[in-house]
Amino acid sequence: MTPIGRYISSPMTLLQNVRLVGCAGHFDLSIANGVVRNISAHSPSITAEATVSVIQGDGHLAIPAFVDGHMHLDKTFLGTDWISHVGADDVKTRIAEEKRLRRNHAASMAHRARTLAETALAFGTTAIRTHVDIDDETRLKGIEQILELREECSELLDVQVVAFPQSGLFSCATIVEDMKAAVEIGADVIGGLDPSLIDGDFDKSLAVTFGLADRFGKPIDIHLHEPGEIGASAVAKICERTVALGLQGKVVVSHAYCLADVPHDALSQLAEMMQFAGVAIMTGAPGAGKLIPVSALIDHGVRIFVASDNVRDAWAPFGNGDMLDRARLLAYRADFRDDAKLEFAFDCATDLPADILGFTSRGPRIGRQADIILLDTPMLAQAVCDVPTQRRIIRKGRLLPPGGGGIAQRSADTARHLDPR
Ligand SMILES: [Zn+2]
């Protein structure tokens, strides 16, 4: 696994003999200061100057590195002993149970978050949007530690931090003030959660969330677990407020399970509102029957992307931080079978979240940041189904040391110490 914080990008790199998606033949890529500057047909005889680093592509497929647009680095138990999952009847019970588990966990949040970030990087993710809890117990400690991690790993990972009121905005008097403070010390995005079922006041909740975004000039990313009519009303109100504040293209609704419940005609109307407002939808491709109607949303021009969400934490024992596996899950759940749709599932883990969330475009194209994965696979569509684990990761033109393996290599006792909380 790649230790975070030890690598800098190489000024000049020649990536030789790779294949590109949709292009016949083999190619050489010239990379300068971390950006792809030129692509030419592969020439076996070409020799690089001594000052240029050379990466032998060996005819492998070069694809963009992943963008994981919805993680919870602060929540994961990855890198520590297995914690048996405890059931919960509703979101409020789950939140309380999570607090209990995290309060009593022996390993520090900083260690667990770092482990997940390193694991994601080893799978080829070079950009992460992470939601970070702000509640009555954590206050700003989680935000501060994730901001420190972001600083430390900036050469390897681009990280956006969402100030996330996991217990609701109004569950105690300090949270709204802490949300403001979080942005002032470096959080990038205003988070939100279930305006009716958690915050208990639909209009007040959205007014505060959008008010913070307006005041600080920040985008919004709202967790919406609310079902059926309640959730659909929230989506409509979010679209209205987005347009009213001129935030088109800067608002994400995460999950939006309600869209799976909405009747066809109502869905069309709602999708048109989302398209007009530029409100995008994140799905984790959940396994419990609540997948958003992906094809219908795309047909209406609604932008979607896929992300890991919870990785082995109090919310779910599943997840491994591998976005290629997450693309496969999306394809499986959405019944994507032909090559074009399988490649679209891949785009949902790469180009689409980069564009929606405002990360620098990455991948093997001229002008893009040279964050590239090399796969020994015949075709991208096959890779989405096979999920090959042997990957070489290039970050800003520099080949990272062999990674993968991830979780098992992080011995729990290497960093087990008392939680500084
Ligand atoms: Zn989440």
Image (cartoon, rainbow, N blue to C red):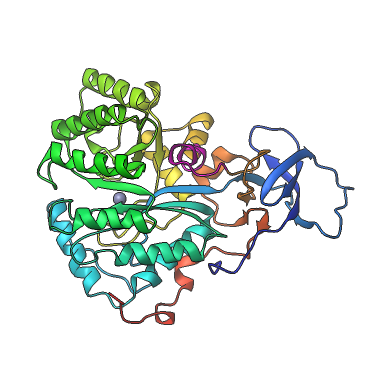
Rendered position, 335 above or below 254: above
Using the rendered image of the protein, determine whether residue 374 is visible from the camera's viewpoint: yes
Between 39 and 379, the residue placed more toward the observer is 39
Q: Is residue 210 above or below residue 182?
A: above
- Taking the magenta stretch, the answer to whether it contains residue 375 is no
**In this view of the protein, can residue 296 be seen by the observer?**
no
**In this view, which residue lies farthest toward the left?**
200
- Indicate the position of residue 185 as horizontal and vertical percent values: 37, 59
Would you say 74 lies left or right of 115 here?
Answer: left
Q: Residue 47: image x %, image y %? A: 88, 52
Describe residue 297's horizontal placement relative to residue 410 as left or right. left
What number of labels is visible?
Answer: 0
Across and down, in percent, residue 367 comes to 66, 39
Q: Quadrant of residue 80?
A: bottom left
- Residue 13, image x, y percentages: 75, 53
Q: Which residue occupies the foreground of this view, 418 or 125?
A: 418
Magenta stretch bounds: 347-361
Q: Which residue is at the front of the view, 54 or 60?
A: 54
* Residue pictured at 33% horizontal, 67% vertical: 77
- 280 or 404: which is nearer to us? 280
Q: Which image quarter holds the N terminus?
A: bottom right
Give the left or right position of residue 229, taking residue 351 as reference. Answer: left
Q: Residue furthest right?
A: 45
| Residue lying at 54% horizontally and 69% vertically, measured from the top left | 3
Screen quadrant of the C terminus: bottom left
Residue occupying the point 31% across, 47% down:
190
Magenta-span inclusion, residue 355: yes
